[in-house]
Image (cartoon, rainbow, N blue to C red):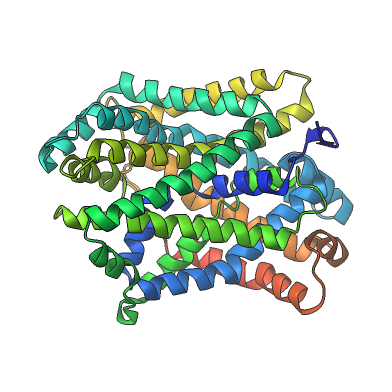
Amino acid sequence: MTEIGIHQSWSSRTGFLMASVGLAVGLGNLWRFPYIAGLNGGGAFVLLYIFFVLAFGVPIIMGELALGRRGRLSAVGTMKKLTAEAGASPAWQSIGWLSLLVPFLGLAYYSIVAGWSFDYIYRALSGAFAGLDSAASTAAFDALQADPVRVISLQFAFIALTVLVVGLGVQKGIERASKIMMPALFAMLLLLVVYAVFAGEFARGLSFLFNPDFSALTPKAVLMAMGQAFFSIAVGVGGLMTYGAYIPERISLPRAALVIAGADTLVAILAGLAIFPIVFANGLDPQGGPGLIFATLPVAFGGMPAGALFGALFFLLFLFAGFTSALGMVEPIVCWVEEKWQVGRMTMAATVGLLAGIIGIAPALSFNKLADVKLLAGIPGVENWNIFQIFDGLVANLMLPINALLISLFAGWILSRKVAEEELGLTGKPFLAWQFSVRFVAPLAIITIVLFGFFGA
């Protein structure tokens, strides 16, 4: 078994890339990107999004991976080591702690929505989608959310599977699962796109996504493209820094960053090509959010040829996307515990999962028993947030961008040029372009996104 320091390493470049792409590709890729692209200029929005990914998304990925590989430890251990080497303020070590807290709290509520996919795979295979209308589908979705035992059971089932894979180790668990699940995810997506070509209004879906309407690129649309480019690539979560600690020296970080960002974008585009032709063919509203996945699509699959099979395939795809991201949420914490205590890896992973699940009970109950609990009542703008929304707002809107901002600044200003050049394998103008992005472009973009409330826009 290959090891780097006290931790295992990836056995191959492919294994690392599959795991890292899996971390970046999440539930939002399957509904949010296609939806906001279609409503904000189609092809014009996609071009703008790709520009932002290249301008600051890829450079931040490179920076986070470089920090991880240089430190060769958990996020906390890495930041302690690099801060000491640079003679910088210990305050920079907060990056390490945020890189544990963000994925831990993220898993606590992310697992709730991901767990719903188990229920919908079963429904599809059992023929429950057949003849379903919009009202019945919405009622079924509401019934699921209103059942606390069911919601929490599905949540813990999802966490248990995640824990099992992480507990098996970097190579035998995360890498092996990613090598199976990511090719399967792409294969399922392509199969669903082919299905949409024949069973849906593919031309209309294609136009919705790619017909360039530059008049729709309002300041709000530009901000949404910028925000999507940042939030979609998993920087600041802690997973990339941790995965970076396991990377052999022979792997090029700039190429890896381009593959991660490119694959993430490709999944989002293919998801749109699979979903919207089906939605349009059934005269349904292409609304965003979980409602599109759990209330609208079952109606579409229920009225189409082989809808049970392809409906189950879609929700299996949804499960895979959530699962590979969740692996990267558990691993940063397990990596840190591995450095602190001599405990079996499976025990460490199980403890992390159990604690996250227990904390996630509160947001799970916000759909039913605690639906009327508004902890932020009286605060304008967030007074109606339930506990789930508070978790999401705290993690996605505040902690994650702050951590990504700190990572970008540390990589650009604190990490020495010599160290950065060694890790990135860049010199001259390419290095200066990367440095300019992480020093100025990325921080400005992140601050803009936060100040103008990307997710609340």
* Quarter occupied by residue 133: top left
Above or below for 233 versus 163: below
Where on the picture, by quarter, is residue 217?
A: bottom left
Residue in front for this viewpoint, 186 or 298: 186
Q: Quadrant of the N terminus?
A: top right
- Horizontally, residue 184 falls left or right of residue 307, namely right
Viewer-proximal residue among 171 and 328: 171
Q: Is residue 78 left or right of residue 139?
A: right
Q: Residue at x 33, y 43 (%)?
A: 385
State which quarter of the image contains the C terminus.
Answer: bottom left
| Residue 33 image position (x, y, % from top left) | 39, 58
Which is more toward the observer, 16 or 434?
A: 16
Horizontal and vertical percent for residue 450? Answer: 48, 60
Residue beneath the point at 54% across and 65% down: 447
Q: Where's residue 290, x and y in %? A: 31, 44
* Number of numbered tags placed on the structure image: 0
* Relative to 153, residue 317 above or below: below
